[in-house]
Amino acid sequence: MAKSRAQRKAEQRRRRELGLSPEIEAGAPEEDLGTEAPDLDQLPDSPQEPLASPAPSRADVGAPDASEADLAADAADKISRRERRRREKEEQRASQASIERRQPQQRVEKEHGAIVSFFSSVRKELSRVQWPDRDTLVQASAVTLLFVAVAAAYLGALDAVFSRLVDLFIT
């Protein structure tokens, strides 16, 4: 797994503190030691002259002798700060959207007559309708027709019963 620049620098710093050679040890993979090939601009003029150390990163400035616990705490703090900033931005977006929703809708000035504006609003509403698919349409139509037939039979039966009763009372 590739290591980050901060991890490689921390390993180099630990090696320097322990007095180990910064060069790759025999048999150790380059990635495990955290060393990388130097740029041609950074090569020493003579073999005895040591390589110039790279400029410190923002994470290294002010804490050159940080322990691993401090580095882990800094990393956790950085993640928590990043998470906090992300949450603050989300809350800000949500509050802005809420404010926009609460503001009254501005009415469009009427440029046309009442009839034309009515049909234009009908057209807008029909574009928002969620139209059913064929199966749903057939099923809903069948249920409606069945309900109408049952209601008609019930009302027809009641009408026949009451008309007979009325005929009996009249005659």
Image (cartoon, rainbow, N blue to C red):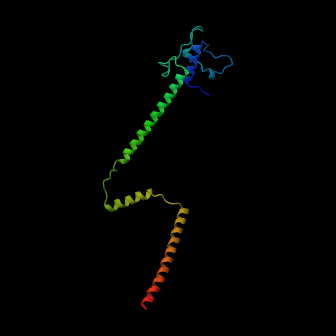
Q: Where is residue 68 in the image (x, y as percent from the top left)?
A: 55, 21
Q: Is residue 90 above or below residue 143?
A: above
Most distant residue in the bottom direction? 171
**Figure quadrant of the N terminus:** top right
What is the number of callouts on the image?
Answer: 0
Q: Is residue 25 left or right of residue 137?
A: right
Up-down: is 92 above or below 119? above
Q: Which one is in front, 124 or 156? A: 156
The relative height of residue 160 versus residue 26 in the rendered view (above or below) is below
Q: In x, y percent, where is residue 98?
A: 39, 45
Farthest right residue? 27
Residue 12 at x, y = what percent?
57, 17
> x, y percentage for residue 124?
40, 57
Of residue 81 and residue 127, the one placed in the foreground of this image is 81
Occupied quadrant, residue 33: top right
The residue depicted at 55 percent of the width and 15 percent of the height is 42
Of residue 102 and residue 43, the one placed in the foreground of this image is: 102
- The residue located at (56%, 25%) in the rendering is 4
The quadrant of the picture occupied by the C terminus is bottom left
Foreground of the two, 127 or 11:
11
